[in-house]
Amino acid sequence: MFDLFRSRDKAVRIFLTALLSLVALSMVAYLIPGYGGSDTSSTDTVVADVGDGKVTTRDVQLAIRAATRQRQMPPEMMTHMVPQIIDQMINEKAMIYEASRMGMRVTEADTAKAIREAMPQMFPDGKFVGREAYAAMLAQQDMTIPDFEHYMSEQLLLNRFRSVVLESTVVSKADIEQEFRLRNEKSAIEYVKVAPDKIIAEVKVSPEEMQAYYEKNKVNFRVPEKRGLKLVVFDPASAAESTTISDEQLRRAYDQNKDRYRTPERVKARHILFMTTGKPAEEEAKIKAKAEDVLKQVKAGGNFAELAKKNSEDPGSKDKGGDLDWVVRQQTVAEFEKALFGLKPNEISGLVKTQYGYHIIQALEIQQAHLKSLDEVKAELTTELKTQVGQQQAQATIDNAMAALRKNPQQVDQIAAQYRLKVVDVEKAGAGDPIPEIGVNQDFESAIASLKKGEVSPAVAAPGNRTIIAVVTDIFPTHPATFEEAQSQIRPSLLQEKTQRLVEQRAIQLAAKVKELNGDVKKAAQSMGLEAVTTPEFARNGTIEGLSSPDAIPETFTKPVGTVFGPTLIGTYRVVGKVVARTPANIAELATQSDSIRDEIKRTKARERNALFEDGLRQQLTKEGKIKIHSEVLKRLTTNYRG
């Protein structure tokens, strides 16, 4: 494989890459790489016999491997998808068999022509790149040349057969015109939204109502299981702070890492860029003239930073007054580097031309290459060494503390003190409750979920690079909630229920008011302190501004202008309104859309007919004994993919 790609013949490399893409795409499209190939191994177990063809376990495995390799199907979906893949493979085999029975044929020339048209790179300058390269690439996809060419010929036959179904689909002028009218008709409505967020402030919940709600719904209120905990917290930062680093350790670490502290020659720089890249060539003279004018201003003592903010076209430095910070060699293009490193401190260059345009460069400060001394890096190095030592000690401390806790879980405080660890008491904690030091953490919840009193959890990572071990000190079983325990659930539930009732009442009142005022939605809304909205026109497949799809309010396209609708429930709010406009489709535009509409209707009908045809054909061939599914093989195969 690698030798092939090392070939000096560029045309061969292009062909190999393109062929790999074609094979991969065909596998994604059909989920069946090489199925039914002429070289099917006799050792393959047959899942189904279809006419004179077979679907084997190897075929299915290759299809599944291709689907997961191309990321078309998540592995966890295999249990559900494998039976569907097998069904589709059987259906396609049935269609290919029926096409052959009807006398449809694909010749070798047809197959060769299809491959040549799909892969012109196979024939650079009209010459085939060679059978060896062709076979080697197919082998990477578990396919032989006969496999691939048989697969291609079957797909040609299948597509021809399906095209017969498509071509036999009749779409009348009436169908096209009806669809055109549906697509292009537009409506507009005037509506009022009665929303909970506008009403909830009016809703009051009394203690008596809460008590009554509790009594009525007592069975629904339960306190989930909770645990009392002692958390043992290991913080490597604290361990690092208590660690002492000797001068000898510092010197040794410095000597071992001197290369880290070597500073190359560098210049602190700023620039103003006048971009020529991406601009017409005839504009370059104008750009250069502008750059020369700004350069004169800089040389005359103008404020470099302000001129950069005003004129520079470098988005990374413009707003910083052209500041590039420290620049080392080989960090910029050659022309820029040569000019910059040739400047003295505070010196300003002339115009410097690069591939990006014209630059005005200033060197603010220059540092020669040098090695930082131990004194210069001592603080940084000390912090690093403390962190390293703390991390090295961390696992040993955690392991030792956990072993001690598991041996004596009643002595949490003493063990924590021995290892200089922090202890946090948690009186009661259940699923979803925030825990001190760790917050809401699913990993932690999973770690303690099955623990009994006195048991110790595994170590769990916590924010701030800390590690936490929990000891269960008590368990409070699930139990029916008392009124006091349920209040935090009762109030929001009752508030939501009362708000929704009030929303419904207001909406009914509004609808009655609109009818009373002979359909005057705006006046009805104003009388109730609400706001009426008149929408722009929208199509059936569009969106009603401020609401949702027109499907939510069927009257928009099914009732005449002037029809009052509602209250209509949309999400949590209710809508009352009126159809105010209806614009029919402009039949003069039918001709321009006719072909696309016809094709879409034909495809839709063909899909429906194809599905019915496949189902009917499969039933017929099964009755004729032409399809035989080996249920034990199928069961064994699908079982292998269950999680």
Image (spheres, rainbow, N blue to C red):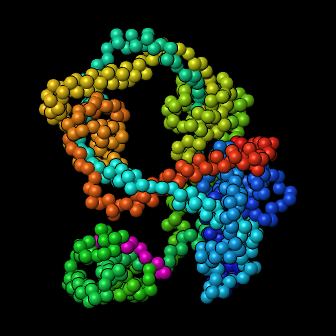
- Percent of width and height locating residue 427: 53, 23
Q: Residue at x 61, y 40 (%)?
A: 460
Q: Is residue 562 visible?
A: yes
- Give the magenta range: 321-331
Q: Residue 62: name its quadrant.
A: bottom right
**Is 303 situated left or right of 247 in this image?**
left
Q: Is residue 214 above or below residue 593?
A: above
Q: Position of residue 395 (x, y in %)?
A: 67, 46
Quadrant where the N terminus lies? bottom right
Identify the residue at image location x=78%, y=57%.
Answer: 52
Q: Nearer the viewer, residue 477 or 242?
A: 477
Q: Does 628 sit above or below residue 14?
A: above
Locate residue 388 relative to residue 513 in the image: left or right: right
Estimate the x, y position of residue 269 in percent, counting from the top left: 36, 77
> Viewed as shown, does residue 180 lie left or right of 623?
left
**Foreground residue, 477 or 262?**
477
